[in-house]
Image (cartoon, helix red, strand yellow):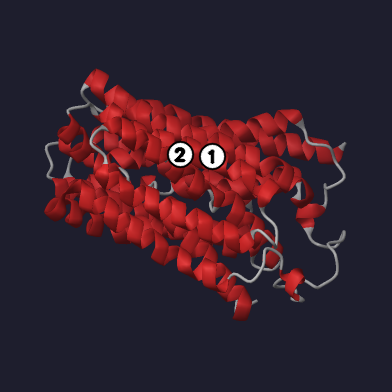
């Protein structure tokens, strides 16, 4: 079924929000670590703590969405969060030291989190019945598009105007990317405007909504919930590594352009990988699709550990970019499979919170591990072990789900 009309506008609006709040706030943040650290005379761990603080605030911002999002609050929320995000980002250029930057990163994170994954998936689940996997993967893929498209631009501005000019540019881009949502998102739920979801009807959701609802009467399995939380923690933690690709390239005696190319390749794979994962899930299911992606990310880590050539590490960076699909589309679809659509709203915000906190924590952990060891070898080994552990978790979730269904 084709996505057209208002449904297409809604999808475009959601793409803009994730390109802004994730693509710009998170995926290009690594470009600022080195220049900020050098100007203020601090380590990369202290500089990367900005990303940690921002991402933790992002996670908690998302937890408030189910409580405050409604038809009445939609426009004020969009406008207020966008203004806060843009202003706090641009204001980073005025900071005389690292501590004020930490404070502004709290505001950045909360504002981005209010319009982040929980907001976007809530709107998409209301507006789409058909093509929900495709719509979700396209929207989440736009965070990678923003990273791939704007990393060289922001890097160029940092090189010519300094990191302060880079933050001003990111603030301006944030407003531009959020404008489609402010202007074109008519409602949280299409039924509020007398419209039907794509592939659905104006009638309330019933038992025929789809297979995702088949287990809606079942209580939440605590062991499965813990396993999905573990999945979110591990694969989201891995998405903190690309922020350090510029530093990794430097330790391999490569120039800054190589690090920026790694980041761009990773972000391009981020986008394409999410869309491909959505298509694979529709065709062969979440379990096999996620396991294939897990194997490819593990291969990327092995390549980064063993090979130092500029071409190979760019290929490895691109393969590693598939971890973003595992941490976004994978988490969303695994949650739907494990708990059903009716339990999605009860479980996904917490699962997303854990994933975001893991990403936030490991953004700094990687920086401090570099400060301690002087390299990234131990970090790459750590992530390889974590990615391999995902295989056991996915197998357990589906085995447990099958056993519960049989009972």
Q: CA distance from mark 1 to mark 2?
A: 6 Å
In the rendering, which numbered label is found on residue 90? none
The answer to whether residue 117 is above or below residue 371 is below
Count of marks, rendered view:
2
**Element carrying mark 1:** helix
Residue in the picture at 11% in, 37% down = 253
Q: Give the position of the C terminus as an image quadrant.
A: top right
Residue identified by numbered label 2: 55
Q: Position of residue 219 (x, y in %)?
A: 83, 37
Crowd band around label 1 with a 10 angstrom C-alpha radius: few (<14), some (14–19), many (20+): many
Seen from this angle, which residue lies furthest top?
372
Choose between 178 and 292: the one closer to the eye: 178
Q: Position of residue 125 (x, y in %)?
A: 68, 60
Q: Position of residue 342 (x, y in %)?
A: 79, 50
The answer to whether residue 27 is above or below residue 75 is above
Residue 281 in view here: yes
Residue identified by numbered label 1: 59
Residue 329 in view here: no
The answer to whether residue 227 is above or below residue 11 is above
Residue in the picture at 52% in, 29% down = 389
């Amino acid at each position: 079924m084709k996505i057209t009309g208002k449904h297409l506008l809604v999808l475009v609006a959601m793409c803009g929000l994730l390109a802004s709040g994730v693509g710009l706030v998170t995926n290009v943040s690594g470009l600022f670590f080195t220049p900020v650290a050098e100007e203020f005379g601090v380590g990369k761990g202290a500089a990367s703590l900005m990303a940690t603080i921002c991402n933790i605030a992002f996670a908690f911002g998302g937890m408030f969405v189910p409580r405050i999002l409604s038809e009445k609050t939609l426009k004020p929320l969009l406008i207020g969060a966008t203004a806060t995000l843009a202003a706090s980002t641009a204001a980073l250029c005025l900071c005389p030291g690292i501590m004020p930057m930490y404070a502004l990163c709290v505001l950045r994170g909360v504002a981005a989190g209010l319009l982040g994954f929980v907001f976007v998936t809530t709107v998409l689940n209301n507006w789409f019945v058909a093509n929900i996997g495709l719509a979700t993967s396209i929207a989440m893929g736009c965070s990678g598009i923003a990273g791939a498209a704007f990393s060289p631009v922001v890097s160029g501005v940092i090189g010519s105007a300094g990191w302060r000019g880079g933050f001003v540019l990111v603030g301006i881009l944030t407003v531009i990317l959020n404008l489609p949502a402010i202007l074109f998102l008519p409602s949280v739920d299409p039924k509020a405007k007398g419209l039907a979801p794509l592939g659905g009807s104006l009638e309330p959701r019933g038992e025929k909504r789809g297979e995702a609802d088949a287990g809606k009467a079942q209580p939440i399995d605590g062991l499965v919930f813990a396993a999905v939380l573990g999945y979110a923690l591990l694969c989201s933690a891995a998405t903190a590594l690309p922020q350090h690709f510029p530093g990794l390239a430097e330790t391999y005696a490569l120039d800054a352009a190589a690090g920026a190319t790694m980041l761009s390749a990773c972000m391009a794979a981020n986008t394409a990988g999410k869309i491909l994962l959505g298509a694979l899930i529709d065709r062969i299911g979440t379990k096999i699709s996620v396991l294939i992606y897990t194997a490819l990310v593990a291969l990327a880590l092995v390549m980064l550990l063993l090979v130092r050539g500029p071409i190979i590490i760019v290929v490895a960076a691109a393969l590693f970019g598939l971890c973003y699909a595992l941490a976004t589309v994978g988490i969303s679809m695994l949650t739907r499979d494990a708990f059903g659509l009716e339990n999605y709203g009860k479980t996904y915000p917490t699962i997303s919170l854990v994933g975001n906190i893991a990403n936030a924590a490991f953004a700094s952990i990687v920086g401090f591990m570099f400060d301690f060891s002087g390299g990234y070898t131990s970090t790459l080994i750590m992530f390889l072990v974590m990615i391999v552990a995902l295989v056991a978790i996915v197998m357990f979730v589906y085995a447990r789900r099958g056993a519960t269904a049989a009972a």
